[in-house]
Every structure is written in C-alpha cells, then in structure tokens.
Image: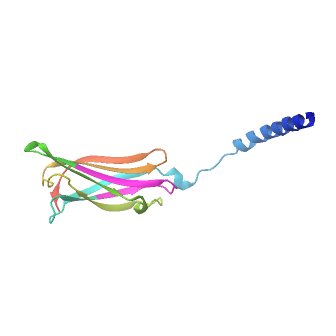
Amino acid sequence: MQRWIVLTVLTSALVGLAAPAQAAAPVAAPAEDAATTTVTLGDVVIDPKIPSRARVDVSYLCSVADEARSLTVSVEQQDPEDSSSKAFGSSRTPEADIVCDGTVQHRQLLVQSKTVNWIPGADAVLIATVSNIGSTPSAAADSRRVKLAVG
C-alpha cells in the first residue's frame, strides 16, 4: 500500500513539473484565424416586376472555421404618408451556402415584404448580419438608411 502511495505521489510530481513546460510553449495561430468576420451592405433596389421584393447586395468576409455561419438581411420601411403602415421582411442564407475561405464573398439576396409593397423614394433601414454560430465574437453586422429605388 505504501509503495502505491509513493508511486502515485512521484508520478503526480513529475506530471506537475512537465505541465508548465508544455503550457509555456507558444502556439502560433493560423493566419486565417486572424481575420475577423465583416459584412458590408451594397446597393438595394425594388424588383420592377414584383414590387414587394427588394434585391440587396451584400459582401462579407469570414475566416476558415469549423463553426456554422449564417447570413441574414432585413429591410424595414415606413410609409411616409401613413405611420401605421410598415413594409418589412428578411432573408436568411442557409449555413451550407456561406463560404468562409478568407476571401471577400458577394451575394444578392431577395427580401420579400411580408405586409405591403416597397415604396420607391421612401427611406428604408437595411441590416445585414453574419452570425458565427458557436464562436466569439458571435456576429458581425452592417446597417444603414437608404431611399429605395426601382431597379
């Protein structure tokens, strides 16, 4: 029994001495991890054939990672003549369609209004978000106010 206790104590001491040496070794992060996720809104136009749809251009950049990513674009517009009337909609890209290889990606998403048609010449709020599901930081976003035009 005493031999087992002595052997356990010696083994623990040796492991304790070796652990700081391993932990002190610097670990270089891959270059891809250094890039942060960014998203930038581009042009937005109302579809001339279906006025309840808006086409939104989005560019994003994300590094190579194992985590799932999601791209969401939202548009909201209040009718300047009727404050109770709002057009709004959002579009989400499936995780499998998000390419994260460290290069800038360009996408065009269709956003369908769930209530009324988009109004040409009226202000709208655009929001684009790339969510890094399961990583930190959890999201990158861009937003802006624009006047919608027919494309």
- Residue 50's quadrant in the figure? bottom left
Is residue 148 or residue 14 the one in the foreground?
14
In the image, residue 48 sits, relative to residue 24, either above or below, namely below
Between 132 and 62, the residue placed more toward the observer is 132
Q: Quadrant of the N terminus?
A: top right
Q: Quadrant of residue 44?
A: bottom left
Q: Residue 15, percent across and down?
A: 79, 40
The spot of residue 8 in percent (x, y) is 85, 37
In the rendered image, residue 60 lying in the magenta stretch gets the answer yes
Please identify the dominant SS of the magenta region.
Answer: strand
118 up-or-down from 26: above or below: below
Residue situated in front as seen by the camera: 127 or 8: 8
Q: Residue at x 82, y 36 (%)?
A: 13
Whether residue 32 sits left or right of residue 99 in the image: it is right
Q: Quadrant of the C terminus?
A: bottom left
The magenta segment: 57-75
Residue reaching furthest to the left: 81
Query: What number of labels is visible?
Result: 0
Q: Position of residue 140 (x, y in %)?
A: 39, 47
Colouring of the image: rainbow
Which one is nearer the viewer's eye here, 53 or 106? Answer: 53
Q: Is 59 part of what is drawn in magenta?
A: yes
Is residue 45 shown left or right of residue 31?
Answer: left
Task: Using residue 89 as the reference point, say whether residue 94 is left or right of it.
Answer: right
Q: Residue furthest bottom?
A: 49
Question: Which residue is drawn at the image coordinates 33% and 62% (left, top)?
Answer: 107
